[in-house]
Image (spheres, rainbow, N blue to C red):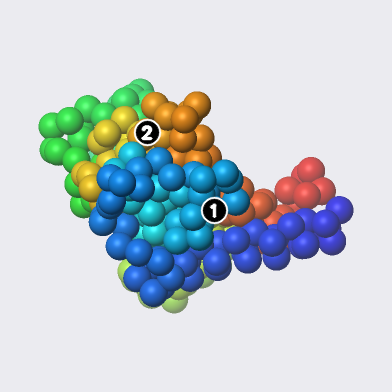
Amino acid sequence: MRRRRDRAAVLGLGVIAAAVLVAALAPVLAPTDPLKGDLLERLSPPAWAPGGALAHPLGTDTLGRDVLSRLIHGARVSLIVGFTTVLIAGVAGVVLGVLGGYYGGRLDEAVMRIGDIQLAFPVLLLGVALLAVLGASLGNLIFVLALSGWITYARIVRGETLSVKERGFVEAARALGAGDGHVIRRHVLPNVWTPLVVVATFSVARMIIAEASLSFLGLGVPPPAPSWGAMLDEGRNYITTGWWLALFPGLAILLVVLGINVVGDWLRDLLDPRLERGI
């Protein structure tokens, strides 16, 4: 079982590395300008299908834009949103969770109650409401998704902090005159990283799906900038006449999310072997 998971993790890491490389080298790898179209070549099928052309390996969209080029550039949006959102939400959640768990009192109560109120709203519903007010843009999309994700990290870190701060080595550090900052930095934070790494890994996949969902609803990156969710939205109207418009961005989302989740499972077992033994 462990070897099988290790092999799956290698494949997952390969998919993630390939996606990051493609996003980083998008201007070099994309065969054409993703924003430039030719109406005379609109809805051209993939190169291997009847009527396809080698100049457009994955076909063209309704405006004659190259699907492969848009798919490559769309990887930038998905990965930037996924990783940046998790970074912002993680930092905010860790800070609030550590402070609330360590000091307790009104600060802890305020953080947890705000989190409870926010959890009452589904992520997509909250995202739709905020983006409808703020407007659709990459920055607003990242802000909204980060705002919806910080509470997960805060709750985990708060629980771990409540446990760690009562342990003997923390009491010993306090007895030796260590201040709160030293205790948090040297003793609390190192003991909360294990669950955070696992949660952050799965959260990247969740945020990529959330970005695609909001872009599908027209609340993601404004057109004509390419994103996988927006490409899916466009392709759903041409399932019978242009099946490739929805198929390829859907496969891209599937592969990247699956690769991230496989790596997340592997990290969970690697960092906490008790989970694999069912303890």
- Residue position for label 2: 233
Q: In which quarter of the image is residue 186?
A: bottom left
On the picture, is 96 further left or further right than 273? left
Q: What element carries label 2?
A: helix
Mark 2 to mark 1 CA distance (whole Å) = 23 Å
Please report the residue visible at 40 percent of the width from the left and 66 percent of the height from the top.
30
Q: What residue type is labelled 1?
A: Ala
Is residue 26 in view from this perspective? yes
Q: What element carries label 1?
A: loop
Residues at marks 2 and 1 touching, judged by CB atoms closer than 8 Å: no
Q: Quadrant of residue 74?
A: bottom left
Q: Nearer the viewer, mark 2 or mark 1?
A: 1
Residue 186, numbered circle: none
Q: Looking at the picture, how far across and down is residue 102, in whole percent?
A: 38, 53
Q: In which quarter of the image is residue 238?
A: top left
Please report the residue visible at 57 percent of the width from the left and 44 percent of the height from the top.
50
205 and 178: which is toward the camera: 205
On the picture, is 146 further left or further right than 158? left
Q: Please, is residue 102 above or below residue 185 in the view? A: above
13 and 48: which is toward the camera: 48
Q: Looking at the picture, how far across and down is residue 171, in whole percent?
A: 49, 64
Q: Which amino acid does label 2 sit on?
A: Asp
Is residue 58 in view from this perspective? no
On the picture, is 115 further left or further right than 243? left
- Residue position for label 1: 47
Q: Looking at the picture, how far across and down is residue 178, in whole percent?
A: 38, 74
On the picture, is 5 further left or further right than 233? right
Which of pointers 2 and 1 lies earlier in the amino acid sequence?
A: 1
